[in-house]
Amino acid sequence: MIVIERMTRMNIFPAIDLHDGKCVRLYKGDFAQSTIFSEDPVAVATEFEKCGAEYLHLVDLDGALSGKSVHAELIRRIIKNTALQVELGGGIRTIQNIET
């Protein structure tokens, strides 16, 4: 007997980590050991969207380190230039940060 289960939808969130205005990946969270994947985070977000992404996980690594948003303008440009639903982390410590 063959059992067919109902498939559920899975949402995949591609991620962009921002450091010094670039898309990076840190090795074990070490800022001294980062790999730059792109100099243009807006272009990367746009490419994710072209590939069918609906969501984006975005982390302001410099904001996480400093305790306040560092890449707010860059994040605004990503949101303005795509239709992606953005999940944001890094440097969000106050209600004012959230409202901004």
Image (cartoon, rainbow, N blue to C red):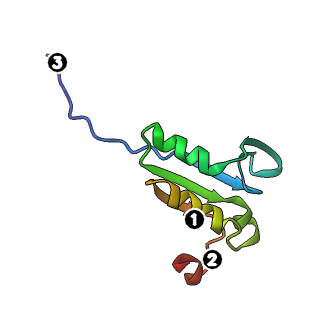
| Mark 1 and mark 2: Cα distance apart in space | 18 Å
Percent x, y of residue 60: 66, 61
Q: Earlier in the sequence, mark 3 or mark 2?
A: 3
Q: Which circle, 1 or 3, is nearer the viewer?
A: 1
Q: Earlier in the sequence, mark 1 or mark 3?
A: 3
| Residue carrying label 2 | 93
Dot 1: element: helix
Percent x, y of residue 32: 85, 50
Q: Residue at x 68, y 55 (%)?
A: 18
Q: Quadrant of the C terminus?
A: bottom right
| The residue positioned farthest toward the right in the image shown | 32
Q: Please, what is the three-letter code of the amino acid marked with disc 2?
A: Arg
| The residue positioned farthest toward the top in the image shown | 1
Q: Please, what is the three-letter code of the amino acid marked with disc 3?
A: Ile
Dot 2: element: loop
Q: Which circle, 3 or 2, is nearer the viewer?
A: 2
Q: Residue at x 54, y 76 (%)?
A: 98
| Residue carrying label 3 | 2
Using a 10 Å C-alpha cutoff, classify the residue at mark 3 as few (fewer than 14 neighbours), some (14 to 19) or many (20 or more): few
Q: Which circle, 1 or 2, is nearer the viewer?
A: 1
